[in-house]
C-alpha cells in the first residue's frame, strides 16, 4: 500500500477514533461523575483527553512508513 493511501485511511481513522472516544468518555463522565467535584472532572478529562493519543500514535506511525520498493527495479 502506498503512503498516500495510508495517510488517507489513517486520517479518517484518527477522526473516527477521536469522535468515538470523546462520546464514550463524556458518557462515562456523565453517568459516573455527575455528583463529583470540579477537580475530579478536571482530572478525569485531563487523563481521558490525553489517553486517546496512544492509538493515534500507532496510526500515525503506520501512516508514515515509507513505500516498499518494487522488486523489478
Image (cartoon, grey):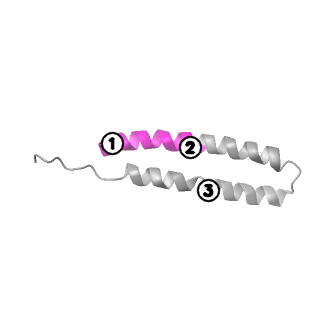
Please check the rendered image and state whether residue 55 is part of the magenta-colored stretch, yes or no.
no
Q: Closer to the N terminus: mark 1 or mark 3?
A: 1
Q: CA distance from mark 1 to mark 3?
A: 27 Å
Q: CA distance from mark 2 to mark 3?
A: 12 Å
Kindly indicate the quadrant of the structure image that contains residue 44.
bottom right
- Please give the residue where the numbered disc 3 appears in the rendered image: 51
- Please give the residue where the numbered disc 1 appears in the rendered image: 4
Residue at (24, 50) in percent of width and height? 68
Q: CA distance from mark 2 to mark 1?
A: 20 Å
> Residue 25 appears at what percent x and percent y?
70, 47
Residue at (68, 59) in percent of width and height? 47
Residue 42 numbered mark, or none? none
Q: Is residue 18 left or right of residue 46?
A: left
* Mark 3 crowdedness (10 Å alpha carbons): few <14, some 14-19, many ≥20: few
Residue at (75, 60) in percent of width and height? 43
Please check the rendered image and state whether residue 11 is part of the magenta-colored stretch, yes or no.
yes
- Please give the residue where the numbered disc 2 appears in the rendered image: 17
Marks 1, 3: nearer the viewer: 3
* Mark 1 crowdedness (10 Å alpha carbons): few <14, some 14-19, many ≥20: few
Per the rendered image, the range of residues in magenta is 1-18
Amino acid at each position: 500500500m502506498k503512503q498516500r493511501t495510508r495517510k488517507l485511511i489513517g486520517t479518517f481513522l484518527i477522526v473516527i477514533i477521536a469522535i468515538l472516544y470523546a462520546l464514550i468518555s463524556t458518557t462515562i463522565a456523565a453517568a459516573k461523575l455527575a455528583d463529583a467535584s470540579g477537580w475530579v472532572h478536571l482530572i478525569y478529562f485531563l487523563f481521558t483527553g490525553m489517553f486517546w493519543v496512544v492509538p493515534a500514535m500507532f496510526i500515525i506511525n503506520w501512516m508514515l512508513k515509507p513505500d516498499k520498493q518494487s522488486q523489478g527495479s
